């Protein structure tokens, strides 16, 4: 199914840029963790955001959400500046954080209700049942989260993200800790988000073979700098490597895994709209992990700033 999924789903009709970063930079003290990042994400695409631990992926997402303030550069999300209008941005962008927290003594339904109220959503009951259905947790709706398996928690996380009916979702390691079946379910769910819900997706993951299956384009970040971007196919052509994300990725991280190769920017997909592939439907499987709300940036001072705490 992997290849089949890829063949069938990876074509997308290029939309207009929905996220635009220009020279986006974040310093922590003297440490530059996002370094003049210029990158556009188009509506309706699944963008794989890759890079080793500490490359700056999560920091970038936090800046896109207005949860961390850029040191310099600009960012627009849905035409909005997250620095000036963070609440508006957050109402339209779902964020499934690396570590989602739930209230263990509350049921799935109660957790969702809490999030819905925080977000001042209307029509809460019907939204809750819609998203629970979507992620296949209807049966478990009234169980306390403490009795949930990891896979169920991930799916609940996805329900939390989707309940706001966002236009964009950021998924930070959404398959973390899932078994192979859970991973497949999650990927099948993610791959349908653009066609079935009109969503644009940024997916951060270290599992390259998974990203390879679902992403229309990828960006490879190292020490805050974008080494390459483009579709796997275009990056393969450009580097002369096989059409395989793992091979391409390791090309940029040879030796110690940190030695940087010449940057490659491939924007073919940005210029050439592709035909929308037939969305033959895979098994309908739901998915998830929730959205946690990160705190506004706490401090921009030098050392040891503490921001991005997950909490509801
Ligand atoms: N609040 C903070 N204060 C100081 N440094 C920070 C803070 N948050 C992140 N960093 C540093 O910024 C760099 C980028 O971190 P970030 O979490 O964005 O990486 P990442 O690409 O998401 O990594 P991972 O793959 O491990 O999730 C790291 O060196 C990290 O230590
Ligand atoms: Mg991260």
Image: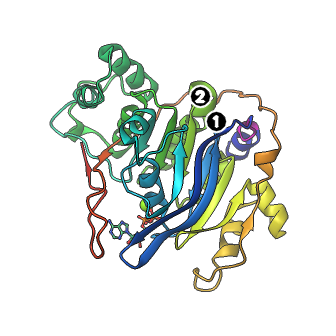
Residues at circles 1 and 2 in contact by the CB criterion of under 8 Å: yes
Is 182 placed above or below 304 here?
Answer: above
Q: Position of residue 240 (x, y in %)?
A: 84, 69
Farthest residue in the bottom direction? 255
Dividing the image into four quarters, tell me where ligand 1 lies: bottom left
Is 112 part of what is drawn in magenta?
no
Mark 1 and ligand 2: say if the CB distance to the nearest ligand atom is below 8 Å.
no
Q: Is residue 194 above or below residue 101?
A: above
Residue 198's label in the rendered image is 2
Q: Quadrant of the C terminus?
A: top left
Query: Where, by quadrant of the figure, is residue 82 drawn?
Result: top left
**The quarter of the displayed image where residue 108 is located:** top left
**Which residue is at the front of the view, 35 or 6?**
35
Q: Does residue 123 sit above or below 265 in this rendering?
A: above
Question: Residue 289's x, y, as percent?
Answer: 38, 41
Mark 1 Cα shell of 10 Å, populated few (<14), some (14-19), many (≥20) = many
Q: Position of residue 268 (x, y in %)?
A: 80, 52
**Residue 210 in sight from this viewpoint:** no
Q: Secondary structure at mark 1?
A: loop
Asked whether mark 2 and ligand 2 are closer than 8 Å, the reply comes as no
Q: Quadrant of residue 54?
A: bottom left
Q: Look at the picture and state if 119 lies above or below 268.
A: above
| Residue designated by label 1 | 44
Which quadrant, please, contains the N terminus? top right
Q: How many marks?
A: 2
- Please identify the dominant SS of the magenta region: loop
Residue 108 visible (yes or no)? yes
**Which of 287/80 is in front?**
80
Instruction: Tell me which numbered mark, 1 or 2, is placed earlier along the sequence.
Output: 1
Percent of width and height locating residue 171: 47, 46
Q: Which residues are magenta?
A: 8-12
């Amino acid at each position: 199914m992997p290849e089949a999924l890829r063949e069938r789903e990876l074509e997308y009709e290029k939309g207009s840029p929905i996220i635009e970063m220009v020279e986006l930079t974040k310093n922590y003290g003297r440490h530059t963790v996002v370094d003049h990042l210029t990158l556009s994400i188009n509506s309706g695409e699944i963008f794989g955001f890759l890079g080793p631990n500490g490359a700056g992926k999560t920091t970038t997402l936090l800046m896109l959400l207005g949860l961390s303030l850029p040191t310099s550069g600009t960012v627009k999300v849905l035409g909005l500046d997250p620095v000036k209008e963070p609440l508006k941005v957050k109402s339209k962008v779902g964020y499934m954080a690396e570590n989602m927290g739930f209230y263990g003594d509350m049921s799935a339904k109660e957790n969702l209700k809490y999030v819905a109220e925080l977000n001042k959503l209307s029509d809460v009951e019907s939204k809750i049942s819609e998203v629970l259905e979507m992620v296949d947790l209807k049966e478990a709706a009234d169980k306390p989260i403490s009795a949930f398996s990891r896979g169920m928690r991930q799916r609940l996380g996805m329900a939390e993200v989707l309940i706001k009916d966002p236009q964009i979702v950021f998924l930070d390691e959404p398959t973390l800790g899932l078994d192979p079946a859970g991973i497949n379910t999650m990927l099948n769910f993610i791959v349908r988000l653009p066609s079935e819900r009109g969503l644009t997706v940024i997916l951060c993951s270290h599992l390259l073979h998974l990203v390879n299956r679902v992403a229309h384009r990828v960006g490879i970040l190292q020490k805050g700098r974008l080494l390459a971007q483009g579709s796997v196919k275009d990056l393969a052509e450009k580097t002369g490597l096989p059409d395989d994300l793992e091979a391409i990725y390791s090309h940029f991280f040879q030796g110690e895994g940190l030695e940087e190769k010449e940057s490659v920017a491939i924007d073919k997909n940005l210029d050439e709209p592709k035909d929308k592939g037939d969305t033959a439907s895979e098994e309908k499987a739901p998915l998830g992990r929730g959205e946690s709300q990160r705190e506004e940036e706490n401090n921009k001072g030098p050392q040891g700033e503490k921001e991005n705490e997950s909490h509801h």
